[in-house]
Amino acid sequence: MTRPPVGALGSGEPAAAVGPTVVALTVWVGLPLVLGTARTLRREVS
């Protein structure tokens, strides 16, 4: 995974390590939701 540039979330703060984890969790949880929503919408349209 690509890491954010140093200093993007503050230099040497714990947030620098938490940031990528939050992004990963957001993608991991959000992606199935988006795919499920798209599948449902496609089923309603057709």
Image (cartoon, rainbow, N blue to C red):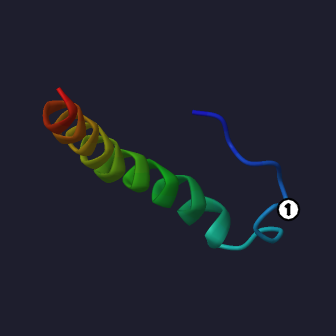
Q: Position of residue 2 (x, y in %)?
A: 65, 35
Classify mark 1: helix, strand or loop. Answer: loop
Q: Nearer the viewer, residue 25 or 38?
A: 38
Q: Nearer the viewer, residue 40 or 21?
A: 40
Q: Position of residue 1 (x, y in %)?
A: 57, 33
Left or right of 44 on screen, residue 16: right
Q: Residue at x 25, y 42 (%)?
A: 32
Q: Which residue matches tag 1?
A: 7
Position of the C terminus, as image quadrant, is top left
Farthest-out residue, top: 46
Left or right of 41 on screen, residue 25: right
Task: Identify whether 17 is placed above or below 36.
Answer: below
Other-residue count near label 1 (Cα within 10 Å), few / some / many at <14 / 14–19 / ≥20: few
Q: Position of residue 23 (x, y in %)?
A: 51, 53
Q: Position of residue 14 (x, y in %)?
A: 62, 72
Farthest-out residue, front: 46
Q: Residue at x 81, y 48 (%)?
A: 5
Left or right of 25 on screen, residue 3: right
Q: Residue at x 26, y 49 (%)?
A: 33
